[in-house]
Image: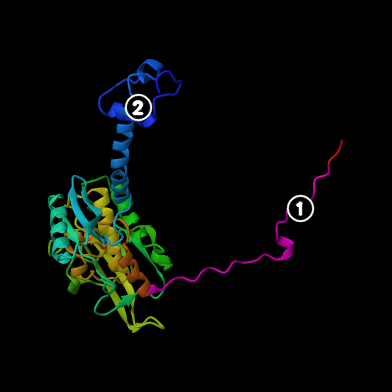
Amino acid sequence: MCGSNRSLPRFLAGGLRSLGVQSVRRDATLRCMFSRAFFTGMLTLVMAFLPGFLRAGAEVASPSKDLNIVEYTMELKVPGADGWSYVDIHLYAIDDGTDMESREAEGRAAMLARFPGAVEVKPAGVAAAFKLFSTPVRWPQPSATWLYNGDDTTPAMPADSALEAIQKGAAGWNNAGGSGFHFDYLGPTTTPTGCNGNVALYAKDGENVVGWGHIVGGYLGYSCHRHGRSHVPGTPYFAIEEIDIIFEPLAAYSAAQLQALALHEFGHALGLDHTEPAACPGKAMCAGADADDFTEPQQDDIFGVIALYGVAPEPTPTVPPPSERPYRVVGPQVARD
């Protein structure tokens, strides 16, 4: 090898660097430092260890096909400075034949502990969790109008902001799930809301009024409705004749909280009762402290709307007569010199 023009073998140069030799000169002088015996010994050593290295590499690159990885999810309701938020978490575990149910429970508990004050939202399963009133009601048509009495509005925000939040809450149900249902705001009124939490005193006045006032029972919001004695044709639901909604003005609302509360109360006004408690929180129609979590209906709430009003048919496109149809003439371009 001495005196030849061959370069130092790449595998040997790399081996030297791994042993701490930082610079390997590939000239004739350095090549002559190694005898044939040294090269033969190094080659024998590499060939002896090479099969083991290859086997180890194969084991890392190709994990056992029998490895069973189990995925499970959890949803958390997490408190924060701006209210509640929801977190979806995906966890993975290797099924090694031990008690997976206990291990999953331990994993869920450990993850829950990482979010102080959080509550795990239990899935409702395949059964619907929405509820209709014990005497089921709905509007005869998929729409309802309402008026607003802004007297004694909340001091927590400007009067215009309060009305805007309530309007957004009502609009959250518009065409939910393709139902075609919608609430229509007609403007202000001086008629007081007849609903104050005591349904025994709820009197019919012919107007659907949303407004402010103290609510019996300490509620933040309350919805009342009156229905007739006959069913909406073709349905098992009694026809709603009038609704009123009242909000407690002394609560320290944010705009988002008032919007969510309005969404909840207007959900009652279209025919939805409170969601099954076992499925809460997680729905706009959940009761109590969970009533102002969402500013738009959740999937189970939408199922309830569809149960009441169905899905609106797709509008049939109208074709104008030939004389009124717009035409655009398209023809080949003619090249000119």
**Image side of residue 325 versus residue 193, left or right:** right
Q: Tell me: residue 50, above or below residue 289.
A: above
Q: Is residue 63 left or right of residue 276?
A: right
Task: Identify the residue shown where x is 42% and y is 18%.
Answer: 3
* Residue 243 x, y percent position in the rendering: 30, 69
Find disc 1 in the rendering and name its residue: 329
x and y percentages locating residue 179 in the rendered image: 41, 68
Disc 2 element? helix
Mark sitting on residue 36: 2
Q: Residue at x 41, y 74 (%)?
A: 310
Extreme residue in the right direction: 337
- Answer above or below: position of 336 versus 77: above
Q: Which mark is residue 265?
A: none
Q: Is residue 113 visible?
A: yes
Q: Position of residue 218 (x, y in %)?
A: 13, 61
Report helix, strand or loop for mark 1.
loop
- Relative depth, front residue between 199 and 303: 303
Q: Locate residue 241 relative to residue 81 in the image: left or right.
A: right
Task: Let me know if residue 330 is in the magenta part.
Answer: yes
User: In which quadrant is the N terminus drawn?
Assistant: top left
Residue 182 seen by the camera: no
Q: What's the magenta bit mostly, secondary-structure-wise?
A: loop
Q: Nearer the viewer, residue 119 or 301?
A: 119
